[in-house]
C-alpha cells in the first residue's frame, strides 16, 4: 500500500444490516461450508430439514474450526475434533458423546439467518443487537411467468459503502457507462429511513415498441438493492443484488437476474448481458480508489451529499463517511 494511498484513504467500519453470505443453490441439506464475512470466520450449514444456519466457526472446547471436517447431525453441526454438537439456531451445545453433563459455556454465537430471493442472508450488528428491520421478498424471483434466476458474484477490493454509492451518483453514468446525459432522478426515503428509491423515466425504443420506461432502483440498508425496468405492458426485468462485507476493504457482490418469459428471447439475454457488462465497467474504478471521508463536492452532487448523511445510521460508531 503506497504512502499517498494511506494519506488519502479513510477506513470505514463494517456496517450493520442484512447481507448475503451465499446463494441458496450453493448449499444442500447436510452440507457444511467455511465462510468468512464481517471480518469473522463462520460456518454455514443446512440442517437435514433444509434450514440454513450460520455459527461462529471455532468450537469453545479446544478450538477446532466447525467448518473444516464438521458434519450435520439433524439440526446441529458436529465438531470434527471431539464430536461436540451445536444447535444451528441457538448455538448451544446439545450433545457431548463422552459426557452426560454439558458445561453452560459450551456454546457458540448463532447468527440470525433469513433465506429469500435466492440468497442466504445474515444479520450483522457491531454491538450484537438483534435484527432491527426487515426487507421484502422479490415476487418476480421464482414466479412461473419469470425465467429461472441467473446469478453472478464479484469479489471487489473495496468497502461496500463505496459500491452502494453508485446508486446516488448519476453523473458517473456519463463518464463510466457512456450515457449521453446523466439520467434525471427522483430520490425518496422511507421505512424508517432505511429504504431508498431512485427512479428516472425516459422514452425507450425496444423490440416490443417505443415506451415510456422507468428504471426503479430500491435499496434496503447498505446491503440490498433491486433494479427494475418497468413500462412495457405485461413484461419486466429485475436485477437483485447484495453487497456483503468480507472485511472492511473487501466486498462480495452477488447478483440475481430474471426477466418475464415473454421477453426472454426478444431482449432478455441482451439486457442481462448489458447489465453485467455495466457492472464490469465500474470494477476498475472500485478496485483502485480511496475512500474520501470528506470529499470535495460541487453543487451538482446533491444526491451524493444526501447519501453520505443517510449512511451514518448503519454504523454503531461514528464513521468517517
Image (spheres, grey):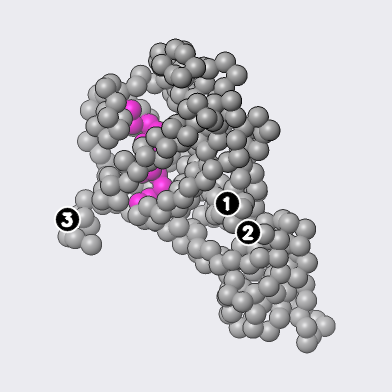
Q: Residue at (61%, 83%) from the top-left corner?
A: 62
Q: Residue at (54%, 49%) from the top-left corner?
A: 19
In the depicted structure, whether residue 75 falls above or below residue 154 = below
- Mark 1 surroundings: few (<14), some (14-19) or many (≥20) residues within 10 A: many
SS class, disc 2:
loop
Of labels 1 and 3, earlier in sequence is: 3
Residue at mark 1: 23
Of labels 3 and 2, earlier in sequence is: 3
Q: Is residue 216 at all visible to an observer of this figure?
A: no
> Is-magenta flag for residue 220?
no
Q: Is residue 239 left or right of residue 9?
A: right
Q: CA distance from mark 1 to mark 3?
A: 38 Å
Residue at mark 3: 4
First to last magenta residue range? 158-171
Residue at mark 2: 27
Q: Quadrant of the C terminus?
A: top left
SS class, disc 1:
strand
Q: Camera-side residue: 236 or 139? A: 236
The answer to which quarter of the image holds residue 111 is: bottom right
- Mark 3 surroundings: few (<14), some (14-19) or many (≥20) residues within 10 A: few
Q: Find residue 318 and report its horizontal and vertical position in percent.
A: 40, 47
Q: Is residue 311 left or right of residue 120?
A: left
SS class, disc 3:
helix
Q: Residue at (28%, 47%) from the top-left corner?
A: 284
Q: Camera-side residue: 213 or 58? A: 213
Q: Find residue 306 and report its horizontal and vertical position in percent.
A: 37, 30
Q: Is residue 236 at all visible to an observer of this figure?
A: yes
Q: CA distance from mark 2 to mark 1?
A: 8 Å
Q: Find residue 140 and report its horizontal and vertical position in percent.
A: 62, 32
Query: Which mark's residue is nearer the viewer, 3 or 2?
Result: 2
Amino acid at each position: 500500500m503506497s504512502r499517498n494511498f494511506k494519506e488519502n484513504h479513510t477506513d470505514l467500519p463494517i456496517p450493520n444490516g442484512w447481507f448475503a453470505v451465499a446463494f441458496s443453490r450453493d448449499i444442500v441439506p447436510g452440507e457444511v461450508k467455511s465462510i468468512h464475512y464481517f471480518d469473522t470466520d463462520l460456518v454455514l450449514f443446512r440442517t437435514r430439514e433444509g434450514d440454513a444456519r450460520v455459527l461462529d466457526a471455532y468450537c469453545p472446547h479446544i478450538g477446532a474450526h466447525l467448518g473444516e471436517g464438521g458434519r450435520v447431525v439433524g439440526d446441529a453441526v458436529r465438531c470434527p475434533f471431539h464430536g461436540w454438537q451445536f444447535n444451528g439456531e441457538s448455538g448451544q451445545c446439545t450433545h457431548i458423546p463422552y459426557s452426560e453433563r454439558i458445561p453452560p459455556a459450551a456454546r457458540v454465537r448463532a447468527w440470525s439467518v433469513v433465506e429469500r430471493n435466492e440468497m442466504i442472508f445474515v444479520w450483522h450488528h457491531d454491538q450484537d443487537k438483534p435484527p432491527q428491520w426487515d426487507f421484502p421478498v422479490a415476487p418476480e424471483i421464482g414466479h412461473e411467468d419469470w425465467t429461472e434466476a441467473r446469478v453472478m458474484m464479484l469479489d471487489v477490493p473495496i468497502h461496500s459503502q463505496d459500491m452502494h454509492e453508485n446508486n446516488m451518483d448519476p453523473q458517473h453514468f456519463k463518464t463510466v457507462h457512456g450515457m449521453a446525459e446523466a439520467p434525471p432522478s427522483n430520490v425518496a426515503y422511507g421505512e424508517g429511513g432505511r429504504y431508498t428509491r431512485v427512479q428516472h423515466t425516459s422514452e425507450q425504443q425496444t423490440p416490443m415498441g417505443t415506451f415510456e420506461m422507468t428504471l426503479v432502483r430500491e435499496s434496503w440498508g447498505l446491503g440490498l438493492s433491486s433494479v427494475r425496468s418497468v413500462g412495457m405492458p405485461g413484461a419486466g426485468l429485475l436485477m437483485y443484488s447484495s453487497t456483503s462485507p468480507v472485511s472492511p476493504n473487501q466486498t462480495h457482490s452477488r447478483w440475481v437476474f430474471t426477466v418475464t418469459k415473454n421477453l426472454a428471447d426478444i431482449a432478455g439475454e441482451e439486457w442481462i448481458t448489458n447489465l453485467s457488462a455495466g457492472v464490469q465497467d465500474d470494477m476498475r474504478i472500485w478496485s483502485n480508489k480511496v475512500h474520501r471521508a470528506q470529499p470535495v463536492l460541487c453543487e451538482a452532487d446533491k444526491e451524493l451529499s444526501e447519501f453520505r448523511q443517510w449512511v451514518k445510521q448503519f454504523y454503531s460508531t461514528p464513521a468517517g463517511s
